[in-house]
């Protein structure tokens, strides 16, 4: 489908937000969490009017993941009357939701996670929320030293996971070229045709897109394919102990990550005759994650746990689902209290990969000379 | 800096220690460094960005680090409070570690800051610091810089919360703790969280619900604060590590204040001074157990 | 119905295998579910006690029977709660999950079953499955060892297999673990296997037990001539969802819950050493 192009002004966005809410949808957008101008922080939150949307950044602290795989959710509840147990489960109706101003690195994570959530068994809460949600991404102009989306095959204006992409057309950042990308996007545009203008004023859209890509490409230049092969054939390596020395194993990286999806299932009694079975975020960085009842732990040390996180993202998931389990958002680096830095680790692995490739070449040609 | 690098190089080359844990330039400001050879000691830095409390790497929970050999650790006066805490509680023994004290003129709140220290960017704990020159160390390096600027930011925030009605206070903490995702980064970076298995991960019975809902988050943060009463070294790492930006040092600051008011005690750098909850005095005011 | 919603099952029988190991026989309470419920040897389930949580075990009974049995040791919160349950109580069961032992492939072949301790549970499922369809298989040999006589599980069944002419049972306890009236072998499983010396030709081996036992038994199988892709085992890793989502049971790129729990020795060799 060739993307249909429209135009959305600041006033149009305000009306769209208003009309979506009037029509019963929940609107989620990045909003500033603090008034402090020196160190602004943002979160994705439900909004009541477009005035609160922080389109220009910063990147929200947590990714969009929390709206599809919430930090905690009830899977079922039980009740016991005498010996009889009855089960109840959430209705499976998820509120109609529109995300306005999703960062492309967050939107891209959703189709990546669809793979694991949908292979063979379909995770109904995940797909229920996916189906109920339309994603309006906005081409990103934010970039700091931790961003690296181009290194994992994405870009600040990536279409992946978006139903509609907004591209700023001027330096104000408030007026946008609109690219309609999917049937869900089309449906939304059809229902709110009056807020969009056509033909679009493309303004400086192309120029701004290119500038953003150039900026984002500066941070990291790696070959994910080579890293994958190296990881697959070098499971045991001294590099991990050195990398993981400073790691606290706290898993803050996994909490803020748009693609980390590991979870726990636990029972919470509420009194003696009833309770809730919940699904909670969990992380491979915790030593309890793999601890067996017998006391045996297949990953007893932090170096093994950090390796698992990198392996899962750059070798296991690509092998299994043909997707890198990372969108280059850089949140893990920003959130880390110990200064662990995924771009730096990837650079190290890339160097190891390319030097081992050279070695292989040298040894394979060595016999000839 | 040079003095620190030379000392570290000497310790490593003479085989006293197998690693020097200090600070280095990282991708986002200064970060913990693990220096294993004399040649690498030129990476060591120390300035206002040296925010992190490296005593956490001495904790018995970091057994994997211990396996890699005896460490020397660069500590500021405030970090020495945590080292003293670990010694006081017999979590480490003094011979396990070489302590390199650094004279300190204060640190930023955020290791990514730059420019001169100011009321805005200085860490809360630096105000009125009486440990700018840590005692009970093996080596002491650097000149004593001038005093850091003072800030009453945290004090006034705590006063603001104290002035709230119980309902307002509950609403305030509810709105903050609703963001808690129970990653427990606050615990993992805490040098005084020494338990092999945290009470909030005990399952039989579950004392603290593990879910990131308000009930669980409240239970966890209250438990954490109470377990640190009289032990907290006030390094502020819990708050700095929180990916959800919860102002945890307000809770710890308040508890520390209560301990100080009641027992005239602040965690210091002398391991031989007992902590109020690890000690009994006849003259203690015991009105709370009447 | 939600993926995470368990079937309700009722405990219809309870057998104490050893001091700390118990078998529960479970029946699905909903007749409709029971009517369509099927599983294959080697598959596992998520068993739950409401209020305590879920726990992963293999299905220890044969698919030829119309009940589900699990055998467990009390090691944690859920198993402790399971031990407190009585006949007539209700629990949850999700499953069956995972792959299976390729019994159809094994038809017309000899099978040697090798197990240690509670590792007999998943093997016992296949033993009964083959015994219930006895004419489809050639020689069946069981080599089973435990630390002591008190640690042997399924004692009544061991006695039954001992009596049966159509299966050869070698049971053993570790040196020092025997009682005065012990009539079986004394020694470790690898040595007993060597003594039993089942023929490798036209044969499969199914092995399950503590890692140390497996480690020393595989070379014996190799010496006897069993090709590695005819040696099957079942892995236990910590799991939560059983559905290939929660990320807990990864060993390299393998999801034990979906690619396993049954693997050949060849497959195990290719895995990173993280289990």
Image (tube, coloured by chain):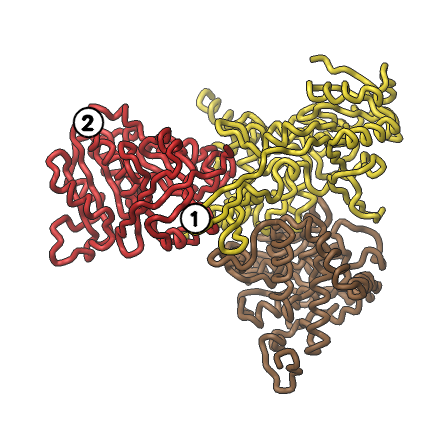
Chain colours: A yellow, B brown, C red
Q: Chain of mark 1?
A: C
Residue at 66% across, 47% down = A336
Q: Position of residue C251 (x, y in %)?
A: 45, 37
**Residue neighbourhood size for the residue with mark 1, other residues' Cα within 10 Å, grouped as few (<14), some (14–19), many (≥20):** many
The answer to which of C120 and B132 lies nearer the viewer is: C120
Q: Residue A186 is drawn in which quadrant?
A: top right
Residue with the mark numbered 1: C49
Question: From where the camera sits, is residue B105 visible?
Answer: no
**Residue neighbourhood size for the residue with mark 2, other residues' Cα within 10 Å, grouped as few (<14), some (14–19), many (≥20):** some
**Disc number for residue B230:** none
Find the distance from the CA under tag 1 to the CA under tag 2. Answer: 38 Å
Q: Position of residue B152 (x, y in %)?
A: 83, 64
The answer to which of A330 and B143 lies nearer the viewer is: A330
Q: Are marks 1 and 2 in contact (CB under 8 Å)?
A: no
Q: Secondary structure at mark 1?
A: strand
**Residue B238 position (above or below residue A331):** below
**Disc number for residue C137:** 2
The numbered mark, 1 or 2, whose residue comes first in the sequence reads 1
Q: Residue furthest top?
A: A2
Q: Position of residue C269 (x, y in %)?
A: 36, 34
């Amino acid at each position: 489908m060739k993307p249909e192009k429209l135009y959305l002004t600041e006033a149009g966005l305000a009306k769209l937000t208003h009309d979506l809410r009037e029509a019963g949808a929940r609107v989620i957008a990045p909003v500033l969490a603090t008034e402090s101008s020196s160190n602004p922080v943002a979160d994705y939150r439900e909004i009541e009017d477009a005035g609160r949307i922080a389109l220009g950044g910063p990147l929200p602290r947590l990714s969009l993941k929390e709206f599809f795989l919430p930090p905690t959710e009830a899977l079922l509840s039980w009740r016991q009357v005498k010996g009889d147990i009855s089960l109840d489960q959430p209705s499976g109706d998820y509120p109609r939701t529109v995300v306005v101003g999703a960062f492309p690195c967050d939107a891209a994570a959703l189709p990546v996670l669809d793979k694991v959530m949908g292979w063979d068994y379909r995770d109904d809460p995940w797909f229920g929320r996916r189906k109920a949600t339309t994603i309006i991404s906005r081409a990103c102009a934010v970039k700091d030293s931790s961003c690296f989306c181009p290194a994992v095959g994405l870009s600040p204006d990536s279409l992946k996971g978006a139903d509609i992409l907004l591209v700023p057309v001027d330096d104000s950042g408030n007026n946008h070229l609109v690219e309609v990308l999917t049937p869900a996007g089309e449906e939304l545009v059809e229902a709110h045709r009056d807020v969009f203008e056509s033909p679009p004023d493309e303004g400086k859209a192309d120029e701004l897109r290119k500038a953003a890509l150039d900026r984002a490409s500066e941070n990291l230049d790696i070959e994910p394919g080579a890293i994958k092969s190296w990881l697959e054939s070098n499971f045991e390596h001294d590099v991990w102990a050195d990398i993981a020395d400073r790691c606290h194993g706290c898993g803050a990286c996994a909490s803020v990550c748009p693609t980390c999806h590991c979870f726990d299932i636990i029972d919470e009694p509420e009194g003696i005759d009833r309770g809730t079975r919940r699904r909670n975020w969990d992380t491979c960085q915790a030593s309890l994650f793999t601890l067996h009842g017998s006391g045996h732990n297949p990953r007893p040390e932090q170096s093994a746990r950090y390796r698992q996180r990198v392996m899962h993202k750059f070798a296991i998931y690509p092998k299994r689902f043909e997707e890198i389990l990372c969108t280059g958002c850089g949140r893990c680096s920003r959130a880390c209290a110990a200064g662990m830095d995924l771009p730096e680790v990837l650079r190290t692995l890339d160097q190891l990969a390319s030097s081992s490739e050279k070695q292989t070449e040298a040894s394979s040609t060595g016999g000839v000379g | 800096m040079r003095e620190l690098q030379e000392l570290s190089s000497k310790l490593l080359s003479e085989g006293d220690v197998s690693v020097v844990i200090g600070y280095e330039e990282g991708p986002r400001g200064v970060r913990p460094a693990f220096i294993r050879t004399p040649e690498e000691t030129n990476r060591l830095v120390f300035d206002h960005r040296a925010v992190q409390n490296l005593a956490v790497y001495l904790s018995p929970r970091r057994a994997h680090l211990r396996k890699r050999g005896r460490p020397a650790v660069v500590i500021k006066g405030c970090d020495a409070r945590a080292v003293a805490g670990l010694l006081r509680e017999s979590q480490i023994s003094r011979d396990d570690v070489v302590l390199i004290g650094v004279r300190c003129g204060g640190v930023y709140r955020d290791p990514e800051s730059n420019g001169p220290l100011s009321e805005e960017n200085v860490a809360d704990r630096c105000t009125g610091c009486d440990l700018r020159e840590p005692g009970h160390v093996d080596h002491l390096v650097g000149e004593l810089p001038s005093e850091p600027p003072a800030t009453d930011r945290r004090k006034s925030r705590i006063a603001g919360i104290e002035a709230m009605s119980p309902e307002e206070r509950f609403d305030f903490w509810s709105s903050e703790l609703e963001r808690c995702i129970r990653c427990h980064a606050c615990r993992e970076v805490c040098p005084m969280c020494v338990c092999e298995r945290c009470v909030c991960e005990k399952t039989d019975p579950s004392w603290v619900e593990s879910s990131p809902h308000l009930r669980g988050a409240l239970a966890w943060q209250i438990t954490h604060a109470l377990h640190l009463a009289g032990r907290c070294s006030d390094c502020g790492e819990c708050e700095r590590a929180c990916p959800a930006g919860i102002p945890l040092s307000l809770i710890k600051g308040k508890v520390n204040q209560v301990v100080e008011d009641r027992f005239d005690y602040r965690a210091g750098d002398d391991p031989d001074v007992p902590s109020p909850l690890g000690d009994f005095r006849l003259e203690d005011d015991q009105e709370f157990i009447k | 119905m939600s993926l995470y919603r368990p079937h309700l099952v009722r405990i219809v029988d309870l057998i104490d295998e050893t001091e700390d190991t118990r078998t529960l026989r479970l029946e699905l309470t909903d007749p409709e579910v029971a009517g369509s419920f099927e599983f294959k040897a080697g598959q596992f389930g998520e068993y739950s006690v409401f209020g305590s949580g879920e726990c992963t075990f293999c299905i220890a009974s044969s698919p030829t029977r119309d009940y589900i049995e699990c055998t467990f040791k009390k090691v944690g919160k859920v198993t402790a709660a399971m031990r407190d349950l009585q006949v007539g109580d209700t629990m949850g069961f999700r499953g069956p999950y995972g792959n299976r032992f390729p019994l159809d492939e094994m038809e017309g072949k000899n099978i040697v079953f090798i197990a240690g301790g509670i590792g007999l549970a998943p093997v016992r499922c296949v033993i009964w499955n083959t015994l219930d369809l006895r004419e489809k298989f050639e020689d069946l040999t069981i080599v089973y060892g435990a630390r002591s006589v008190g640690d042997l599980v399924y004692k009544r069944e061991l006695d039954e297999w001992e009596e049966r002419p159509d299966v050869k049972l070698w049971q053993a306890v570790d040196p020092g673990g025997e009682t005065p009236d012990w009539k079986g072998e004394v020694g470790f499983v690898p040595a007993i296997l060597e003594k039993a010396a089942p023929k490798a030709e036209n044969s499969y081996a199914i092995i399950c037990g503590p890692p140390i036992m497996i480690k020393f038994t595989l070379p014996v199988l190799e010496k006897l001539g069993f090709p590695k892709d005819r040696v099957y085992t079942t892995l236990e890793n910590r799991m939560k969802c059983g559905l290939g989502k929660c990320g807990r049971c990864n060993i390299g790129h393998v999801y034990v819950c979906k690619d396993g729990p049954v693997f050949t020795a060849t497959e195990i060799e290719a895995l990173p050493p993280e289990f």
